[in-house]
Image (tube, helix red, strand yellow):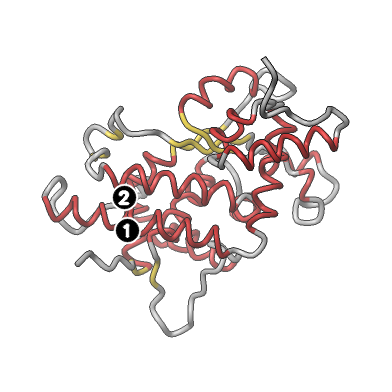
Amino acid sequence: MGFEIAWTFGELESVLASVHGIDQSKRTAFQSRLKNFHRLGYPVGFHAVKGKAATYTPLQIIEMALAVEMTQLGLPPERASWVLARNRWPILMATEIVGRELRQMPDAFSSERGLAERALSMFLYFDPTALNPLTLHLPAKVLPDLDEAANSFFYGGMGIVREGIAAWTSGQSARLSLINLTAMAGNVATSPFDEGSNDDLAYRRDFFRLLEESAFKTREEWGGGDEAEEDYVFNLLEREMVTDPASLADHASIPLNRAVRYCDEFRERWGGGAYDSNPQT
């Protein structure tokens, strides 16, 4: 029988404070920052009941850890929660992959050496555009399509990042923010047992199993899931000019038949014709 993992707010705050080196005298302020995300409606679907201790699933733990990472990159809580909520589909896709990877190798991260090279690093990347408030006449929640941090938000493995980073930073914007979601999850998923012990590895394996299952279930049951996938993929096609369905399937972690359909639809919309999935030789 596996572990039932549900952290209290105190446990969540303690782990995140340790990960980010929060000074003991600043812990109250840090706790207020975390609670502020709840007031802003993040994580999506999280409900704290007054008078009852809140608990966090592995998925919610990772979502809160990600919110703190976005804050570290300079986004204020209001904007960070907006960007994360607007990009829920790619985050869930990336989180599911991370959960599956670390479930298979729960010892891939240690506090001393970090993430082992044998583990697949899954990245979230975007242009933070911290000066965004100075460039828009209306806030992002009114004109969301003008928020480049939300529009540029993507995910991918090391190969995709290595292949695309030069092009992503050679246009109008020469900057990019990266979060190694695999390393972040490995760092946050601490257990109450001695690191490296059998109980520790069993706990971490269950943490990542629950993370993978919850990310998959949430993505499947979330209203508008198909539409969210389509929006993400079309944005990817437009931004990075991916023309090969196999590359699109690999990048977006979707079946090849759906990648072919998306490429066909995208080319038809822009008058480029459909992709021939069975070219004549």
Q: Which residue is located at x 22 percent, y 57 percent?
A: 203
Residues at marks 2 and 1, CA–CA distance in whole angstroms: 6 Å
Q: For the residue carrying disc 1, how many other residues have a C-alpha within 10 Å: few (<14), some (14-19), or many (20+)?
A: some
User: Residue 121: x percent and y percent?
Assistant: 40, 34
Tell me which amino acid carries mark 1: Ser
In the image, taking residue 279 as reference, residue 176 lies left or right, namely: left
Tell me which corner region of the image, top left, top right, bottom left or bottom right, holds residue 164. top right
Tell me which amino acid carries mark 2: Ser
The answer to the question of whether label 2 and label 1 lie on touching residues, with beta carbons closer than 8 A, is: yes
Tell me which corner region of the image, top left, top right, bottom left or bottom right, holds residue 116. top left
Q: Which residue is located at x 63 percent, y 57 percent?
A: 225
SS for dot 1: helix
Label 2 sits on residue: 18
Label 1 sits on residue: 14
In the image, taking residue 84 as reference, residue 110 lies left or right, namely: left
Seen from the viewer's position, the closer of residues 38 and 214 is 214
